[in-house]
Image (cartoon, coloured by chain):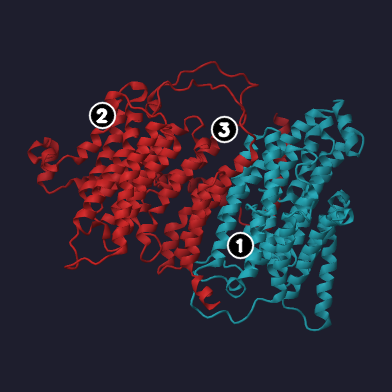
Amino acid sequence: MHRLRALLTPLTFGIAALALGFVALALPGLVAAALGLEGVALAFWIWARASSDPREALARWAWLRRPAMALWFAAALAAALPAAPAVPLAVSPPVSTGLAVVLEVPELVATPSAASRDPLAPMRLLEALAILFAGLELLAALPTSRPYPDHAGPLPNVGAWITGVLPAAGLLVLWRQAPLWTSAPLVREFASLALIFAAALAVLRAYSRRTWTASLRWLAACDSALAAMLIALDALPREIVLLLWFAAAGGRLTALATELRGSAGRRGALSARLWRLAGFSASACMSWPLLIAVGFPNGHFRPLEFVFVAAPVYLATALSLRRVTQVPERRAMARPDATRVLSLVGASLTLLIGPAALALAWWEGFEASFPAGIVALIPALLAAWPRAWLARETELPPVVRASVAAGATARDFALSVYRSVLVFERRIADALAALIRALGAPARDLHAGDAQEYLLFLVGVSVLALLLPLLR
Amino acid sequence: MSATWLALAPLLAPVLALGAALLLRAAQPQRPGAAGVVATLMQCCFLAPLALAIAIPDTLTPLRIALLAALALALLARDREDILQSECALKLTWVLAAAFALSWAGESLLTLAAGTATTTEQWPALALQLDPYGLWSAALAMTLIAGLVLLGGAPFHFWLADVAHGTRASLAPLIATGLQVSGAALLVQRLHGVDAFAQAASLVRGHLTIACVLALLGGAATVATAKRPERRVGLLASLQGALLLASLIATSDASALPLMRWGAHLALAMTGALALAHFLPVAAAPDAPAAALFRRHPYSGVAGAYAMLSLAGAPGTPGMSLWLQVARALVRTHHPGLLLALVVAWITAFSVAATTVRAAFGSPSTAPMPERAVPWPARAALWACAAGLAAMAFGVLGR
């Protein structure tokens, strides 16, 4: 009994809540998903209140109830609304697929009659938006939660890793509930824009962070955002997307775990090389179908969209290759170490799952046209190209040359961009909050709580009730 | 389960709430000896008519409702030493007297216009269009005021928050629920058969829709900003009033939300939630230790939390089934705007209740346990309410 009681600590309660939360997230149904996110939020709350600085930790992770609430909102609507009727679309289905849909003017077709119109369509749209909000917030794709991968979680020792599970929760929400949110009009397009922006910012932040553990958390968020884009664009069957994401983001989380165990993944030439190759392979495999879907919708090349997606892909792949530097052995003769073996197994799996998933996709009918397949490989191949050949200081454009000469680095640039976006978003949020406060302040000051005021208020409302019908 | 038992089941919830009120009274400091016991029993006797009104709302007539309101005011005003309670009594007297007067004036005008005081006979008479629109429409609007004020939906939610905050936990829930059920009964009786006169039905629905949207959104905004847990409970009860209003809009005879079941749930949930709220910190820091109740008796705290969550309509509680029932009725009757307001209010209520429960658990503390235990009658009251709600969730009560 005493031993059992010793096991019942905040750590074990939190782990149980997190595990049950992820099991619920994998189940179908919005209620299960909402319960799953409640489990994740509960785990972080339990750990935060037991941490060394509960005030800060509780305030930092309080936002985790927002995605759960968004899913409850969606679940409530789903429970109340009947199944959607088969209504003809007011907007013709897009000819092209992918991100290009956003930039195209939709072709209007005959408006459905009043009888065939679904009066509850706005409610269904809200339901889809609520699911999307929950997923995007966990993927650090919304301003409200953007900087969270910068922070270690509220657990001692493994706190740096535990934050990495949140993008996984976000992707699971979007993956499992995809039929509900991708069917709503324009939601996929909005999701694609938010996700590509989030991926670009995440990879810039990963680049600007000096510690590899923090960079790995951001790369996991970036990979999850790219995988969510594959779901939004419906570029591949969802099971294949999950496999590709498992290789990419799962590989980052495994690498992060080994990094926290004495950088076991980077000790020894073989291990470091294997992880480099695994990171490259996983990134390249996931980005390849995505670049095809975005850059070559309907066989036509879309350079603008292609570049928007290719840039973060290039940087993420380059980081996977160049930041995995070999760490010197601490002992003259390396001892057999279970962590190192697990690290090698993890790297091997990461290396193999990506190509296997692509092979499975091909088996299921996924095909790439001749130039698209080659062009989509270019960002990953460029990242693998020897660095010295790519960038020479003399070849820099004149605008950048002066800054570089003054000591500015590309990392400084990435950091500035990231911070500028954050400051901009925060200012907009502050302005909105100030506006709401300004509108709400008079309502709060309307009465002082005196009994006579209550009577006057009632009389005022009665007069209004009398006048309203007369004014009709 | 026998038919007699099922017939008696709805009566059990108000009886349980009355029992819980008795226990809460016993947990308060009392006069020594037999005088204390007599005072407790006297209070129970005075609360019994309110419990009866919750159990059988169909028997409420306007006269009985006025008498019930007078009884509630007398109970609030009795203890002159209690400043907060006396202030509640004063405010409620002002507001209820004016509301009843306005509604009575409206009823009289409507009787004058229709030529009969019987509600079901008034609609066909008015449908003949013999009277000017301005007369009967103004009269009809005035008849609704007492019901709306008693229901306690925003902007009339102030009295519920005041009663919950300023009145003792043994009195407040039954007084508040009794008055709310009375308000609902007034509205149901007033609208009985209104569909016979389409123009009046449309006018009433318009009024009630405005009132309901205001009650839902105003209540949600207020509950989200309330600082004191007791006021939050009062505001959650005001959202229950808004919920009933929504069900009246969906179906004018309140069949979307049976009054008996709604009242039974409200009585139990509010009693448990208010009993819990008195043990919660007002504005504790996030890292503050747990409330004394949760440190000494965490399971009793959880029982109270269940009542509060049910009052907010959290998933897994009988409160949620009420919200869902009304939401489905609104969908059936094509009220998407009202449905949206309902869902926004529900999510806010649920979020506030969950945050309150989290704050009650606080942070783990190494400080020594509070020396004095929470009195057992108070804990028994929490358990009684939780048991009643759990039974309701499983469909035993309030069928």
**Chain ID for label 3?**
A
**Chain ID for label 1?**
B
Q: Quadrant of residue B255 in the image?
A: top right
Asked whether the residues under marks 2 and 1 belong to the same chain, the reply is no
Q: Is residue B26 visible?
A: yes
**Chain ID for label 2?**
A
Helix, strand or loop at disc 1? helix
The type of residue carrying mark 1 is Pro
Q: Is residue A461 left or right of residue A361?
A: right
Q: Nearer the viewer, residue B132 or B34?
A: B34
Mark closer to the chain start, 2 or 3: 3
Residue linked to disc 3: A122
The type of residue carrying mark 2 is Val
Chain represented in cyan: B
Asked whether the residues under marks 3 and 1 belong to the same chain, the reply is no
Q: Mark 3 near mark 1, Cβ–Cβ under 8 Å?
A: no
Residue linked to disc 1: B229
Report x, y in % for residue A440: 53, 48
10 Å crowding of disc 3: few (<14), some (14-19), many (20+): some
Q: Nearer the viewer, residue A44 or B55?
A: A44
Helix, strand or loop at disc 3? helix
Name the image quarter holding the N terminus of chain B: bottom right
Please tell me whether residue B2 is drawn above or below residue B385 in the rendered image. above
10 Å crowding of disc 2: few (<14), some (14-19), many (20+): some
Helix, strand or loop at disc 2? helix
Q: Could you give the CA–CA distance between mark 2 and mark 1, rounded to whole angstroms? A: 61 Å
Please tell me the colour of chain A: red
Q: Nearer the viewer, residue B124 or A245?
A: A245
Q: Nearer the viewer, mark 2 or mark 1?
A: 2
Report x, y in % for residue A401: 11, 40
Report x, y in % for residue A420: 29, 45
Residue linked to disc 2: A375
